Amino acid sequence: MNRVRLDLNQPDLQRQLFALEKADQRRILNSLRKLLAMSWEQVYGDKGLRWEAILSRSGPGGERLYSLRLGRGFRAVALRDGDWLRLISLHPDHDSAYR
């Protein structure tokens, strides 16, 4: 079973995460901890994460982007690279993740 590995090294993501209030950071970090314990099959099927393909945009190298729920009120834009989940940005509202 391939476990999810996280890449949180995107500068925009880091700026967004560190600018959040402590309670929001805690919720997001709890979701990231949950992701680390999951297989990719579990991620795809988890109703709380709401993993969705973003058809309106693509990654910097033309990769398929995905949206997933991280904590109450936040979505992340990410791409899958093998076992890595590379988080690109955080969005406090659902619609901004798709633009």
Image (spheres, helix red, strand yellow):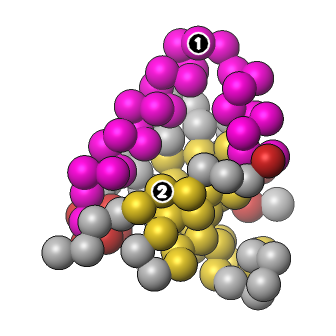
Q: How crowded is mark 2: few (under 14 residues within 10 Å), some or many (20 or more)?
A: some
The image shows residue 43, relative to residue 55, as above or below, that is above
Q: How crowded is mark 1: few (under 14 residues within 10 Å), some or many (20 or more)?
A: few
Taking the magenta stretch, the answer to whether it contains residue 20 is: yes
The image shows residue 19, relative to residue 29, as above or below, that is above
Residue 95 shows in the view: no
Is 71 displayed left or right of 17 in the figure?
left
The range drawn in magenta is 12-39
Between disc 1 and disc 2, whose residue precedes?
A: 2
What x and y, as percent, mark residue 52? 51, 67
Q: Indicate the amino acid at tag 2.
A: Leu
**Residue with the mark numbered 2:** 6
Is 51 displayed left or right of 25 in the figure?
left
Mark seen at residue 22: 1
Viewer-proximal residue, 12 or 74?
12
Residue 30: image quadrant is: top left
The image shows residue 62, relative to residue 6, as above or below, that is below
Taking the magenta stretch, the answer to whether it contains residue 89 is: no
What x and y, as percent, mark residue 7? 56, 57
The chief SS type of the magenta part is: helix
Element carrying mark 2: strand
Seen from this angle, which residue lies furthest front?
Answer: 9
Quarter holding the N terminus is: bottom left
Residue at 75%, 35% (x, y): give it: 16
Residue at 79%, 35% (x, y): give it: 15
In 3D space, how far apart are the residues under numbered discs 1 and 2 (Cα atoms)?
21 Å
Residue at 50%, 33% (x, y): give it: 28
Camera-side mark, 1 or 2: 2
Q: Indicate the amino acid at tag 1.
A: Lys
